[in-house]
Amino acid sequence: MNKDLESLLSELKVVHEDLRLIPTEMIVVSDWVRLKCRYGCNNYGNHLGCPPFTPTPSETRAVLSAYRNAVLVRFEAKPDPKLSAKHAGRALNNSAAKMQKTVAELERTAFLAGYYKALGMNALPCTLCDTCVIGEIQKKDQAVFDLDSIKCRNKEIMRPSMEACGIDVFKTLQNAGFKPRVLKDSKEMVELFGLILID
Ligand code: SF4
């Protein structure tokens, strides 16, 4: 690793300790990923950080080709065994909001360190507002456009989730040496991952 990247990693670890530098060639983009959003996820079309408002897999591939290095950022959301599945979901939303803010801070730190291309990505649907602004647009029966993401209330920190852009997060984590697994119960510990594209 070159000295500049080493010193950047040290700076990033002050913000969040649990992160790992990876070459972007480990990041896998697959066309099937967005079908998992479109068929099976209640959040499809309900958050501006989710499809159809996010970059398509083709756009994501093109964007990734402009980067050599990225940082995977790991977060743990520990379950409270006393919570029902519904309340556990709310607790996970709180963890996701904290992750989003940390990813934004990491992106900013990298940018200020001279990595001007730094760009963050998250996991899960955006949880920064109780109700996404897209809901208000839909309630008024206004037409919804892909570029409605520009109407986000928190544009300075909202970033799309990796899966929303077609990234096969599971395979990418395996390539990077993590051991992701399918969770079968809301009482299991959840690992969340963010990504910062660096240079
Ligand atoms: S920050 Fe608010 S308006 Fe923007 S995508 Fe997230 S929930 Fe929607």
Image (tube, helix red, strand yellow):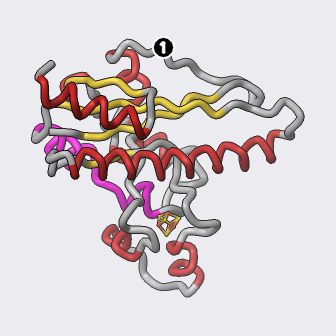
Instruction: Work out whether 55 lies above or below 18.
Output: below
Where residue 64 sits, quadrant-wise, is top left
Instruction: Work out whether 80 lies above or below 57.
Output: above
Q: Which residue is drawn at the image coordinates 35% and 45% (left, top)?
A: 106
Left or right: residue 14 compared with residue 83: left
Instruction: Work out whether 128 lies above or below 61.
Output: below
Relative image position of residue 139 (x, y in whole percent): 59, 81
Instruction: Work out whether 38 lies above or below 73.
Output: below
Where residue 81 sits, quadrant-wise, is top right
Q: Which residue is mark 1?
A: 179
Left or right: residue 76 compared with residue 84: left
> Is 61 included in the stretch rendered in magenta?
yes
Mark 1: amino acid: Lys
* Mark 1: C-beta under 8 Å from nearest atom of ligand 1: no
Q: Report the front residue among 190 and 138.
A: 190
Relative image position of residue 168 (x, y in whole percent): 37, 31
Tell which residue pokes out farthest to the right in this image: 82
Magenta stretch bounds: 48-65
SS for callout 1: loop
Left or right: residue 17 compared with residue 181: left
Question: Considering the image in quadrants, where does the N terminus appear?
Answer: top left
Q: Report the front residue among 112 and 100.
A: 112
Relative image position of residue 59 (x, y in whole percent): 20, 49
Q: Which residue is drawn at the image coordinates 34% and 56% (left, top)?
A: 54
Question: Considering the image in quadrants, where does the C terminus appear?
Answer: top left
Where residue 24 sits, quadrant-wise, is top left
